[in-house]
Amino acid sequence: MVSSETPLLSIVIPAYNEEGRLPATLSSIMDYLARQSYASEVLVVDDGSNDRTAATAALHPGVTVLRRDHRGKGFAVRAGALASRGNYVLLCDADLAVPIEEWEKMYTYLISGYDLVIGSREGLGATRQGEPWYRHVMGRVFNMIIGVIAIQGIKDTQCGFKALSRAATQDLFRRVRIYGDNAPILRGAAVTAYDVELLFLARRCGYRLAEVPVLWNYGAETKVNPVRDSLRNLRDVLTVRMNDLRGRYN
């Protein structure tokens, strides 16, 4: 139930040129929230789109649209997270690759004391639908690199379905550096590894973290460029390690 009172749940959706996929996503989310007894809010962060993303999102009653310069998914997520008002904050992608109902699994962990719960496409109970084999291999290789350089023990850092407590949200997104206030203006779609910095900081700060298997549907209209985005993501992971060595997270 969407309300003006303090929400139990804030849903943050970063969006870059998503006028085609947003209507179905927002309809699913708003229909789901209308069936719930708690107050909620939905924030769509337009990442400097050059189509009608913002206007399309604004057509849905109860949706708040934030417009930002095009600085990448990490910057858009951070803007929405810091603007959110809910006791819990759910981050999800504009294609809603993970069904909104999977939030209920995460809520169970949050109310039991976890600070950050991440959706996982790996491990027992996870389901990946329609994903090409080469994309799965790319993801596994990248996650191994992350384990060596930055974070160990997390099976899937990059799933775009994550939930945090309000305290963890406000603290961690104020600590991030790579896609913070000084993030550069970008050209074209920009898939980033902002998740790695977020999870690295969560571990460093001692937050309780859980990884929960989810259902995930591969989107044929994905904006991922295998070469360009792999290099950008690798750079992000290396930057996290360098920031730590230089004491930028102290």
Image: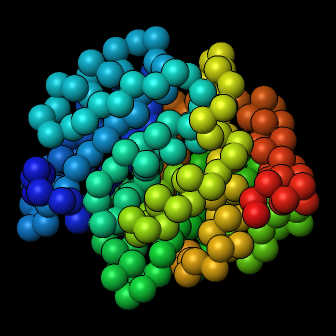
Q: Is residue 95 visible?
A: no
Residue at (67, 64) in percent of width and height: 201
Q: Position of residue 131 (x, y in %)?
A: 59, 49
Q: Is residue 40 above or below residue 110?
A: above
Residue at (34, 74) in percent of width and height: 107
Residue at (42, 86) in percent of width and height: 113
Q: Position of residue 72 (x, y in %)?
A: 60, 31
Q: Is residue 238 visible?
A: yes
Q: Position of residue 199 (x, y in %)?
A: 65, 64
User: What is the total number of numbered labels drawn onto the structure image?
Assistant: 0
Q: Quadrant of residue 210?
A: bottom right
> In the depicted view, which residue is nearer to us: 87 or 11?
87
- Most extreme residue toward the bottom is 112
> In the depicted view, which residue is nearer to us: 214 or 15?
15
Q: Is residue 158 above or below residue 59?
A: below
Q: Is residue 245 above or below residue 227?
A: below
Q: How is the image coloured?
A: rainbow
Position of 126 compared to 225: left or right?
left
Q: Quadrant of residue 146?
A: bottom right
Residue at (34, 50) in percent of width and height: 84
- Most extreme residue toward the top is 50
Q: Position of residue 170 (x, y in %)?
A: 47, 58
Where's the C terminus, which quadrant? bottom right
Position of 28 compared to 161: left or right?
left
Position of 139 compared to 82: left or right?
right
Q: Quadrant of residue 123?
A: bottom right
Where's the N terminus, which quadrant? bottom left
> In the depicted view, which residue is nearer to us: 224 or 30?
30
